[in-house]
Amino acid sequence: MALKAYTTNLGFQWNPTPTFSPMFKTRNLRYKSTKLFDSSYSSIRRNVTVNGSNVVDEQQQVSFNEQENKLIEALIGIQGRGRSASTQQLSDVDRAVQVLEGFEGVPDPTSSSLIEGRWQLMFTTRPQTASPIQRTFVGVDFFSVFQEVYLRTNDPRVSNIIKFSDAIGELKVEAAASIKDGERILFQFDRAAFSFKFLPFKVPYPVPFRLLGDEAKGWLDTTYLSPSGDLRISRGNKGTTFVLQKKTVPRQRLISAISTGTGVREAIDEFISLHQNLSRDETELQEGEWQMIWSSQVETDSWIENAANGLMGKQIVKENGQIKFLVDIFLGLRFSMLGKFVKSGKNVYELTMDDAVILGGPFGYPIEMESKFNLELLYSDDKIRISRGTTTLFLCI
């Protein structure tokens, strides 16, 4: 039945699929090294709104310890809440989850007020066990999915919320809940409805909960609840693992904004403002393979012009001052353009691209074209690079 796996998926969140160039495919965002955050704490004291949800209240602090940061690092870049994760990514998340479950989090989490509130699903290990509607939502980074936990009321409830957008509305699936012990919540789904912004009434979700019997029942164990109350790991009755957060860090919000296509400039501004050290220190154009995931410039109808201007594909930077733009076209064909970069000012590089070719297996077809522009590094580490051309912002990972 359509709701069968709601007994498993009591906790999940999602974001929109990237709307990059037609040359891009939905993919996992891979980072270049293992260290993403400071080893102690990540702190934010700003009022930030993402997908209509205030994820960090003013004057509040988001604090994650070293082991929690390792889990968050493993999650960043995984699309579809785990549906599109590689074997290595799944292994990294599983290892980080097991480490935290072995740590001492909040004892008896179901008895703690920290478990109460709205949680955003960041990852689930088995999205394929969900109902068809859930598989669509959890596996696609276009909507937001939340879980609300309210156990200290006259009507204890756990609810899954699929937020389509601020303009459209949401689907809320509710379950009556009870506490079995310090870790386990028992639940039974009993009602659901769509709330559309353009309608003055709710539209019932057509599932006969009373007729589902045990199929509408389940349990959810909280195996780790952070002392800050911002991170939670739960396991469901069908073996599914969920990672949820109440608050997110700037890097997560930046990637999320790019995936949804909304609030990207604001997320970039926030991220850069929290890393002002770059404005004081010199930085280098780091070697390695960088994937373009977003630019502020509207692409033209000519994909080859977009590729020559670095608006799509990969940038391969070498120590000897060489740089290559590489774009997969289709059916094994690739566009390659070589050039050089020279530092011309503080955090500014002059790029000259003048050796273009269409590659097909061992063969190449030269193309007469040249592209010159300046590239200013606004932020750069071994994970992410934010840069600016004459009129364009670029973000690579």
Image (tube, helix red, strand yellow):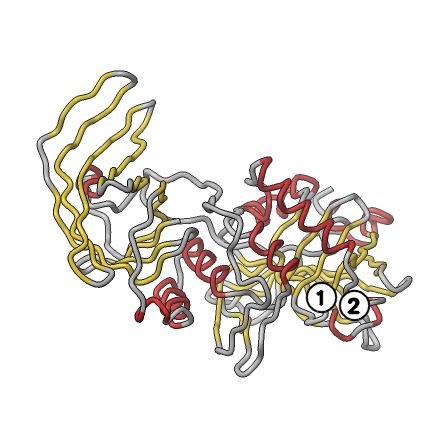
Q: Farthest residue toward the right?
A: 180
**Mark 1 crowd level (few <14, some 14–19, many ≥20, 10 Å Cα):** many
Q: Position of residue 354 (x, y in %)?
A: 12, 37
Residue 106, numbered label: 2
What amino acid is found at the position of numbered circle 2 in the picture?
Val
Mark 1 or mark 2: name the one nearer the start of the chain. Answer: 2
Q: Nearer the viewer, residue 355 or 150?
A: 355
Q: How far apart are labels 1 and 2 at the CA level? A: 6 Å
Please tell me how crowded label 2 is: few (under 14), some (14-19), or many (20+) other residues with Cα within 10 Å.
Answer: some
Q: Is residue 147 above or below residue 28?
A: below
* Amino acid under disc 1: Ser
Badge 1 is on which residue?
Answer: 226
Secondary structure state at the residue bearing disc 2: loop
Numbered mark located on residue 250 in the image: none
Q: Residue most toward the top?
A: 362
Q: Element at badge 1? A: loop
With 170 as the anchor, is 297 left or right in this view? left
Is residue 333 or residue 200 the one in the foreground? 333
Left or right relative to 4: residue 322: left
> Which x, y percent locates residue 49?
48, 72
The residue positioned 30% from the left and 18% from the top of the image is: 361
Residue at figure coordinates x 22%, y 63% from the top left: 346
Q: Are marks 1 and 2 in contact (CB under 8 Å)?
A: yes
How far across and down, in percent of the image, does residue 252 sit?
Answer: 50, 59
Question: Residue at left 86%, top 49%?
Answer: 213
Q: Nearer the viewer, residue 41 or 361?
A: 41
